[in-house]
Image: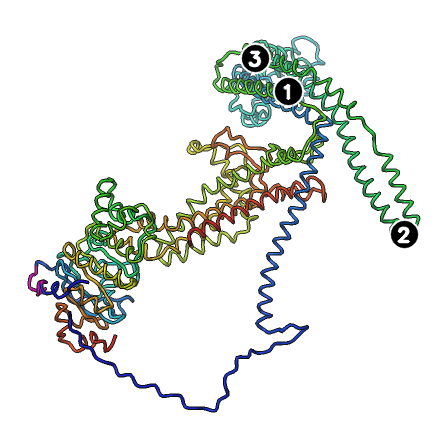
Amino acid sequence: MHDMSNELTTLPKATKKKKSSTVIEVDDIGFSYDHGKTETLKGISMTVPKNQVTALIGPSGCGKSTLLRCLNRMNDLIDTAKITRGAIRILGQDIHAADVDAIELRKQVGMVFQKYNPFPKSIYDNVAYGLRIQGVKKKSVLDEAVERSLKSAALWDEAKDRLKDSALGLSGGQQQRLCIARTIAVRPKVILMDEPCSALDPIATAKVEELMLELRRDFTIVIVTHSMQQASRISDNTAFFYLGELIEYGPTTQIFTNPSVKQTEDYISGRFG
Amino acid sequence: MLRFRLLYLQIPAVPADKPTNKPAPSFKGKRGLRLMGLNITTDGVVKGFFGGNAYLAILALLFICVFLLKSGLGFVPGYRVELSEARVSGIELTNRVRYELTGYKALLARVNQAFIAEKRHLFSDEESAIYLYEEFEALIDDEFEEDIEQYVDLDDGAEKEAASVKLRADIATACSTISEKQLLLSLARRLPDLKKISPEARQQALTLAQEYALNDAETPDAVAAISTRISQEMGTFNTAIQRIKSAGKPLSQLEATLTRQTEETDRILKLNRQTSGSILALEEGLKKAHKRDEPSETITAIEDRLKKSRGSFIEIDTEALIQPVYQAIQNHDLIVDTLVSELAAAFDTLPSEFENKQVTATINEARQLNGELAVIIAKQKENINAWRHDKDVNLSNALTAFFFGSEWQTGSPWQNVYGLMPLFTGSLLVASVSLLFAVPLAIGAALYVNQFAHKREAALIKPGIEFIQAIPSVVLGLFGVLVLAGLLKEWSHSPLLSWIPGFPITERLNVLLAALLLAFMAAPTIFTLAEDALNNVPKAFTEASLAMGATKLQTAIKVVLPASISGIIAAIMLGFGRVVGETMVVLMVAGNKAKIPEFSEGLGVVGQPVHTMTSIIAQEYGEVTEGSLHWQALFMVGLVLFTISLVINSTCQRVLNRKTR
């Protein structure tokens, strides 16, 4: 497996130093699932640096997935959901501004889900889906994008001879990598991953994790994970959430070796959660 | 590697069980009621109840199948007997001649139509004058009878002259008081397309009427003169039509001769069949009576009746009876050859182009019919010459005659024919056209409710559509026949809608009307099932698509719809099954004309009336006697319907299973 210590030492140390490298800026965000009666997120502020993997960890119900879904406004689909305060800026733009179209936003902020969910179509059609809905019809463009994406998702060698076969014939790990390929085919700026490995076996998990470290070069990745080992293995920064609040946020090495808050220490040492 | 701070949890040791004095657990079950060696428990009874009901349903289904088969399949041998009787008696042969005659009559009707139209076109005024004159004549008879008598009694001279002037003036005044509308109304029967009465025609009619009055109520010669002039002027056309009329006479005569010859044979054959049936029954009864040692009076009574039945059995020599038929048919070739050449010659005398476009079109249609008739005759000539009365009719002939027969004719004094085709095509046509309306409607609504509608909106639409299913079909049929039929016919005559195929429709009850109402009935079925299928598409697909930046519409059409396609196909097929099996509405609004619709009209076929498999059963079951051939034929139709439903349902199951696999 990967040699993590090497990876981590070569990372840029501080995230707040360079303002220009910030991709996502969460500013005192409050979020409610029930028209504002109770807040699920209670004033979160954090920034996500470019070309890094940022992990969101915390016990169930702490709001980490909710925050992730706020970033591409997937929560808009819930009728009763509401942003109660604050703002989220991605690449400097307020994503809740009146002139922002959630559909355009999602083209820039892709998402990979907990349960792999390729469409019941061929492998090719799955990867080409994003471009096709954007109106791309030219076969050469689609072919090129499919090959590039599958290669980036480390699936090309396994899938190149069966592009016309149903995606549902792939194994679980392959399906999840196909979903990643589908997401990166439209070249988003940010990829959100919602526990992408929780339905996979250890070997498939290792492959996806390896892939994430590769993808970091071209994309900014925000990942929600339940596995602290995974967070420590792949992320550059870690944010610990508890009951809708951001308890601690910093470089992964610091969070896992020398957390400054007692709750963080308790959680990562397995005393609760 | 990273350094973890590992803390060991301290788990308290589980205290060991204290020894107790409780007895060891027993694994014996409760004993139920013992009855006749059976162990009856509550569970067993409940299970038996449910299981029994389930098997009862299967048994009922089996019973229906067996009954349908038993009653229906007896039809085939029965029909075979009837068909062979029709052959032996010569009815079959006569039908072939009648077929030719029908073709000729259609042609004649078209030519007649053209003739009348041409006459109206050329002599509109003269014709209306004649009919108008008849109206005035009736008026004079009513009102001027005494005046005319007084006038006639007068001696010639100045007084009479003055009286005639007065009478003329009076008549003119009386006639002019009748409004044009009223006159048009009275003329409508004879001149239905007359829109306006020209002043010339009115004047001419008045002159004739005055002449009639002054002539002591005698029809003036001028009236006959006008008629003669018209027929003279119509010269060539008149000659042609007379020629066409007389050309058909030999064929009609041949048909009449054949009908006379065969009807008698057929009657005797049918009578004998009945008699032999009762002889068989009586013989059976006699045997049983002997066995049971019935009193001698009963036995004698049966023997008497048997003797009487045997006596009424007519020995006939079919060979002898058929000879006149063969003799008559010998001339057939000559007759039809003459007919074809005569018709061709008559059509040659007619000009190819008439002043009135309508007439030209009608004549062209007649020419086309003439061409078709020549083909029919050529084919029937072969058929008729090859026909033998003693050729055997086998079971497969009877089956073919049923399944591919193009006529369903019952209760006729001539021959009852049971051909499925008109009913089958009717059912299929109505069902397909109704799906054409229902499918887009229902699938569209299902997609909208499932993908786009707000929860509150869906809560309004869904029960609304599903409620349509609760409307009793007879109510819908009533609405169709009393309200929609009239509206549809009225709208179809609107010039704005004339682009729709089949418009304007002439029949009030037709395929389109039935299809519209059935679409209304099938839509809820399709909607509910399609909505279920859409609902079964995992939310993950929708989410994935939306997260890629797809709009809701793109997601619905490109992801949700393809993912649920097998469920939707099943929904459509079940909708089809619902429509094919629907009875009340089609019975009320489809027009019930057991004839294969004219598909040559293209899409306009939807304007025609049809009969369907379901409605024929509903319509005719009341008038059949149990066990008769007609009775069995209806069961055959039922069997076909049953099979169609079975096939549709099992295909649906297979489609749905493929999805879940």
Extreme-left residue of the structure: A17
Q: Is residue B243 left or right of residue B506?
A: right
Give the residue pinned by disc 1.
B137
Question: Which range of residues does the magenta coloring cover?
Answer: A10-19
User: Mark 2 or mark 1, which has the lower sequence index?
Assistant: 1
Q: Residues within 10 Å of mark 1 (few under 14, many from 20)?
A: many
Q: Nearer the viewer, mark 2 or mark 3?
A: 2
- Disc 1/disc 3 C-alpha distance (Å): 44 Å
Q: Nearer the viewer, mark 2 or mark 1?
A: 2
Both on one chain, marks 2 and 3?
yes
Q: Are marks 1 and 3 in contact (CB under 8 Å)?
A: no
Q: Amino acid at mark 2?
A: Asp
Q: How is the image coloured?
A: rainbow
Residue at disc 1, secondary structure: helix
Depth check, front residue: B297 or A8? A8
Residue at disc 2, secondary structure: loop
Extreme-front residue of the structure: A1
Both on one chain, marks 1 and 3?
yes
Q: Chain of mark 1?
A: B
From this viewpoint, is residue B173 visible? no
Residue A134 in magenta stretch: no
Q: Is residue B458 left or right of residue B34?
A: left
Residue at disc 3, secondary structure: helix
Give the residue pinned by disc 2.
B293
Residue A14 in magenta stretch: yes
User: x%, y% of residue A255?
Assistant: 15, 71
Q: Chain of mark 3?
A: B
